[in-house]
Amino acid sequence: MRRVANILSLLIAALIVTGCASGKAKLDPRTATFPRERFTPPAVMEEALPSGVKVFLLEDHDIPLVRLYLSFRGGAVYDPPGKKGLADVLSTLWRTGGTEASDPAAFDERVDELAAELSVGLGRDTGFASLSILSEDLDEGLDLLAELLLRPRLDREVFEWAKEKERASVARVRDNPSSLAFREFRRNLYKGHPRGVITTEESLSAVTREDVADLHRRLLADSEWVIGAVGDFDANALLNSLSSRLGALSAAGESFKPLPAPSTPAPVLVLVEKDTEQSTLLWGALAPKVESPERTPLEVADQILGGSGFQSRLMREIRSDRGLAYGVGSFYSPFKEFGVMGMSGETGVVSTREVWALMTKEVEKLSSAGVTEEEVALVKDTLANSYIFRYRDPASLVLERMGSELSGLPQDLAERFMRELDAVKKDDVSAAAKNYKMDKGIWIVVGKAELGDEDWTGWKVIRVNP
Amino acid sequence: MGKVLTQRDHEKRGLGKVSVRYIKSLILLLFLLLSSVCFANGGSLEGRVVEHTLKNGMRLLLLPREGAPVVTLQITFKVGSVDEVEGKTGMAHLFEHMLFKGTTTLGTRDWEAERPIFEKIEEVGAALDSLRARGEGESERAKTLAAELAELQQSERKYIVKDEIDAIYSRNGGTGFNAFTTPDMTSYIVSLPAGRIELWAAIESERMREPVLREFYVERDVVKEERRQRREGEPVARIMEELKAAAFTTHPYRNPVIGWPEDLDALGLADTRTFYKKYYGPDNAVVTAVGAVDPDDFIEVCERYFGPIPSSGFRRYPLTSEPKQVEARRVEVRLDAEPIALLAYHKPTLPHRDDYVLDVVDGILSYGRSSRLVRSLVEEKRILTSVSTQNGSPGARYDNLFLLYAEPAPGVTADEALKALREELALLAAIPPTREELVRVVRKMEADMVRSLLSDGGLSRRLSYFETVAGDWRYAEEHPRILKTVTPEEVSAVCAKYFTPENETSVLLIPAGGEG
């Protein structure tokens, strides 16, 4: 027994010695400071095809994979009046309708045999295509990509099925309160503007196969394309391959020029009736555009309001202090011509009014009383210290450059933002926060019909039964 | 490519007395030699992962990578909803939330001053819960207690530094600070600029050693909100709950990770503390670090911060296994939503050979646009607009389910969708697939392994998942090699064995007022 005790005490002594051996004290997480990480990112090569199409390239030979991205102007906001849904139908048909050389099944087999990922589709303002392929199969992959982009079959027979799929996806929006809320948000915020038009049964029925083929032709010949490539390739060889295969893509077309900015809508609360146990609340308004001097301070204000998770005011007031919601937050998306800002959250039916009032109060408080030094310092530290993450996947550097090129924005947008952030002061943020004006925006509430029975909001209420 | 010798290997070989410094330089040397080699060997991590086990049993897996100076750090505990006892479902997930509330030094201005209020909150909260459990939630006594609880919570607030751990990580540039709970495991993740690894170790070792479960009752309400948001947000969440409860009658895979509502109402602080003590020891944890990490330094930091935490020494006992299903089960859910069809079959989990074969079946059925269900049911027969399959739901520590999910096309009922799915399964059971089909599936899975190298987070999840669930991260490395040995005849035989009427559970979401 004694022997055991001796061994034990020796062990304990050894442990203590080991514990001190490094001589290092434990740090206090609250007060510890660290130097900011520095990193010189790899340089993105900027080239152009003979057609003028810009190409951004970044060689990275660590992983035997090539990722190719194509972005072009054109999308749902350009759908002709009465034919909303055209761009979405083309998106589906383009990828699933085969090519001139291969019927749909044969084409898909060729893609899967190469273990490639190949996609093409249109969003709201721009379209996007991508290829991810093992570098040993790059040439075959480029052949498939070029065939799909330039010579799709847009099969007549598959066309009807593509429309049917689109019908189904429009119907399923009803099942997801958040998608439904954002659809109604766009419809009402952009009322009278092409951005506010939504797809209906009638508009979808009016889309013909000729419309789709014509849109495809215009996208190739009269849009603006940019290309990006990241991965295990030789830049010169790839540029040659792209020139020979994708030389037909237009560099400076006229068909899809940016639309004018939308105008401020009349204040309204749209109650989207849905028989559900929770309410989805969404408020939003038009906001300063990317190149506005208010952009950077407003980004900081948005982080403070609800953009920075647990450190934000909405999260603290509604979730952390009161347990009234799981997800609540804010957003600010600045674009070239305009911006959008807002906030959203979900809560139980019984707490709808309370959460609605808390959200309103936080926006009003931010707008009238501004922000504190501590809040601004936290946001600045957070954004500056996490900036290094944009270099982790080199693809993000290429995609950023492509985005700026296509929107006509400066190529050093991210660096500018960081410089402005560094200089931003509490008073700038408080001044920019005055952009938050409840009555310049609109409310969307998805929830039970009874919620609209009495005027508890003080807003003009419109009911929608989706 | 050879395996890196790790400190653990040295210890096994009786080299434990070699000076630590020497071993570390050896590791470093090997690492430098290897780091000049690119990931040419498919998506394999063999020879790139440095392993180490602390004396208290905590496992460390490090994957150093070149590039920007950032690192993804993950701690995974082998505890999930499957480990919960009946009546206390939701505990693993609620505790995951609670670990964000701080410790005796983080999240508080003065723990000694806060403590008496904290203890009183527990007393009043427990009394209120027991009244509510007896159906006396509306009584005068309950109202008094509720008011008292609210007052105590208000007075505790002056000591609370809100979400301080999150704030520290945020201002240090941390991203993706989060956690997740599954039936099998619970994981805590953050990505940081590389120079802040010691900050992570200081915070995480303290969370592990002395968490304070403050703001418990408010957080329990947040979890109820989360449950509602998930159920109301996606109809499939609701019918998946039905599916698990129907397919498993006994095994805890039947319970939702977030817990049954009545259980959530009754989860108390004492239960939560017991749960923590049992499962959150270092001997039940795996740490992964992927990115700009120096193995030498990392191991030293972990020894210093996590090393002093004692092992829990707990033993895991076998769970009641699910009795063999003997007849088909069918559940119909009527909702104001578009139809959905779910189909599930019981099958063994890894490393059973049939589990590998079913991974191939999964690929043949729904992986890629040329897979059978997409080609046949979506593009040719046009019965479905969307289809997917999953081998291994809801977890993989125990025998589980092969799952099929389908969204019927407009005008097609959920029943018709089920019928079409069953026909495809019968076809695969009757006629072996072609060699080309098998080759295509395996090649796609291999390419995915290569793509997974693009993301530190993805690699970290891969390492921690297989280390936790399969007991060895190398399971994922061996996997493609074994898939290549699967034959067409084996595929059909396995389909015939498991895809039988008596082994089937189906759940149909039928639009309210519509027909199945």
Image (spheres, coloured by chain):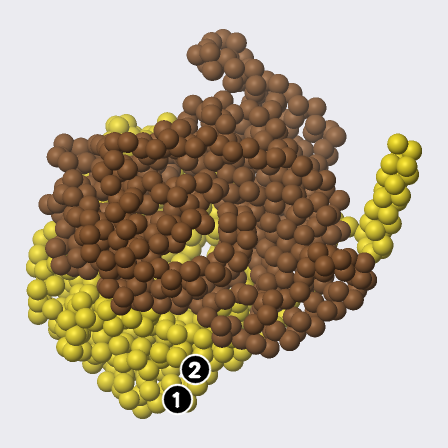
Chain colours: A yellow, B brown
For the point 28% across and 51% down, the residue is B493
Q: Amino acid at mark 2?
A: Phe
Residue A428 shown left or right of residue B261 in the figure? right
**Nearest the eye: B469 or A340:** B469
Identify the residue shown where x is 24% and y is 85%: A248
Q: Is residue B271 above or below residue B71?
A: above
Check whether the beta carbons of the residues at disc 1 and disc 2 lie within 8 A of each other. yes
Place residue B367 in its image quadrant.
Answer: bottom left
Above or below A177: residue B175: below
Residue at the image point whose x is 88% and y is 41% from the top: A7
Q: Position of residue A269 (x, y in %)?
A: 29, 40
Label 2 lies in what chain? A
- Identity of the amino acid at label 1? Ala
Q: Are marks 1 and 2 on the same chain?
A: yes
Q: Position of residue A433 (x, y in %)?
A: 48, 52
Local SS, label 1: helix
Question: Residue A77 placed where, x, y %?
Answer: 23, 63
Tell me, for residue B111, which label it has, or none. none
Q: Residues within 10 Å of mark 2 (few under 14, many from 20)?
A: many
Q: Is residue B494 above or below residue A383?
A: above
Q: Label 2, on which residue? A: A233
Secondary structure at badge 2 equals loop
Q: Which residue is mark 1?
A: A237
Q: Nearer the viewer, residue B419 or A261?
A: B419
**In the visual, does A253 lie left or right of A30?**
left
Relative side of A341 to B105, left or right: left
- How far apart are labels 1 and 2 at the CA level? 8 Å
Q: Residue furthest top?
A: B140
The spot of residue A287 in percent (x, y) is 39, 57
Residue A329 or B118: which is nearer the viewer?
B118
Q: State which quarter of the image contains the N terminus of chain A.
A: top right
